[in-house]
């Protein structure tokens, strides 16, 4: 695919607004917004952020409960040129405090749930209450902010998201717009996402999979279905998938097998598994039901997803592979001298290409250690992540 060097994430969404303004963009409980309505709400908030002095590179945290306002907030931050920093209010307070302390956002967008979760940590921070009954930005322009006066471009940062900390302290990973746009374009192709698709937003905002879900939906004109917290668990998850007619969903394999029967997934056209190694037997059962099953592998430092495997007809393998690199991404298996290993020889995996993040916030030494010059790339400034 052509490398998307000149687009920002929100511009993909704005293109869909022009194509089908009356199409459903987001569904939450009994509430819906069309693409035109969602865009208008996000634009009002974006103009308020710009009026408050937000400029490209400014980090803005979003800590709100699952809602349509959550989606509006993400889009507004991006449209204003801000760097989106997600904070899931369901996460432990200590984790949220750690992110706030490291990210030092210039502004925190909250609602009642978010304010309760953050507590005293908000005392010395500038905030914007998204749940105001009569918000100050109600009369702001509904037109798309012009990125040119802001100086916003595809090489600017889009979001800052923190790793789980499973291999040490959580690290803030800085991802540029163009790398996320490359992912969105590839998702549309790989998973056959169309304007008639209904995608579930399952992942916590603290995981980069949530960005994957929002991009996969709003960049192609599909409908994003945001469930209540209780609908993301156990039997209620299966009921939600069927009730909403979800066609595309990304889930951890353990959660899929916990549904008990593939019948719970009867509306699903594409099931993306990620986060752990799937059970081959379950893969076969799902594939036999006519569901397109994918196994996705990636790291936050590689913009969510680096490789994808599509289950073929008649799959009988004992291990589910991680697949091949997505568009404009390279995977290298290198030895201790960082030279390619021969076929069949174990090596360390390195990720190169469009998805490689800018690095870690406030950690230049670790960035230099993990984000390295790519000696195999055609462009001299290309990097790879190890």
Image (tube, rainbow, N blue to C red):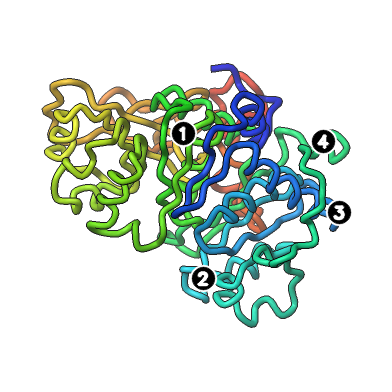
| Front: mark 2 or 1 | 2
For disc 3, the marked residue is 51
Element under disc 3: helix
| Front: mark 4 or 1 | 4
For disc 4, the marked residue is 146
Q: Disc 2 versus disc 1: distance between alpha carbons? A: 35 Å
For disc 2, the marked residue is 95
Q: Camera-side residue: 356 or 208?
A: 208
Q: Is residue 147 visible?
A: yes
**Sequence-wise first label, 4 or 1:** 4
Q: Disc 2 versus disc 3: distance between alpha carbons? A: 31 Å
| Front: mark 2 or 3 | 3
**Sequence-wise first label, 4 or 3:** 3
- Residue at 46% over, 63% down: 168
Q: Are marks 2 and 1 in contact (CB under 8 Å)?
A: no
Q: Disc 4 versus disc 3: distance between alpha carbons? A: 13 Å
């Amino acid at each position: 695919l052509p490398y998307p060097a000149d687009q920002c994430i929100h511009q993909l969404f704005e293109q869909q607004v022009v194509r089908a303004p009356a199409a459903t963009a987001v569904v939450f409980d009994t509430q819906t917004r069309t693409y035109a309505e969602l865009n208008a709400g996000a634009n009002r908030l974006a103009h308020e952020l710009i009026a408050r002095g937000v400029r490209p590179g400014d980090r803005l945290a979003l800590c709100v409960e699952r809602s349509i306002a959550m989606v509006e907030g993400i889009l507004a931050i991006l449209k204003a040129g801000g760097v989106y920093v997600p904070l899931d209010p369901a996460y432990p307070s200590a984790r949220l405090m750690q992110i706030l302390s490291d990210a030092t956002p210039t502004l925190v967008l909250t609602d009642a749930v978010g304010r309760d979760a953050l507590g005293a940590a908000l005392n010395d921070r500038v905030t914007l209450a998204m749940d105001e009954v009569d918000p100050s930005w109600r009369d702001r322009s509904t037109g798309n902010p012009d990125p040119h006066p802001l100086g916003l471009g595809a090489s600017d940062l889009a979001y800052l998201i923190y790793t789980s900390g499973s291999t040490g302290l959580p690290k803030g990973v800085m991802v540029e717009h163009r790398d996320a746009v490359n992912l969105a374009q590839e998702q549309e192709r790989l998973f056959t996402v169309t304007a008639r698709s209904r995608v579930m937003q399952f992942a916590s905002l603290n995981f980069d999979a949530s960005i994957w879900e929002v991009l996969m939906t709003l960049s192609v004109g599909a409908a994003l279905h945001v469930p209540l917290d209780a609908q993301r668990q156990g039997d209620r998850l299966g009921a939600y998938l069927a009730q909403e007619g979800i066609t595309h969903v990304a889930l951890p394999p353990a959660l899929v097998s916990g549904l008990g029967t593939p019948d719970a997934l009867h509306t699903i056209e594409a099931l993306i598994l990620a986060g752990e190694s799937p059970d081959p037997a379950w893969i076969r059962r799902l594939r036999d039901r006519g569901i397109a099953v994918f196994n996705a592998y990636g790291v936050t430092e590689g913009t969510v997803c680096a490789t994808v495997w599509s289950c073929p007809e008649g799959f009988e393998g004992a291990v589910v592979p991680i697949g091949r690199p997505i568009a404009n991404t390279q995977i290298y298996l290198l030895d201790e001298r960082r030279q390619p290993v021969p076929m069949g020889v174990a090596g360390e995996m390195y990720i190169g290409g469009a998805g490689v993040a800018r690095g870690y916030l406030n950690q230049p030494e670790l960035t230099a250690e993990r984000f390295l010059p790519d000696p195999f790339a055609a462009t001299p400034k290309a990097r790879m992540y190890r």
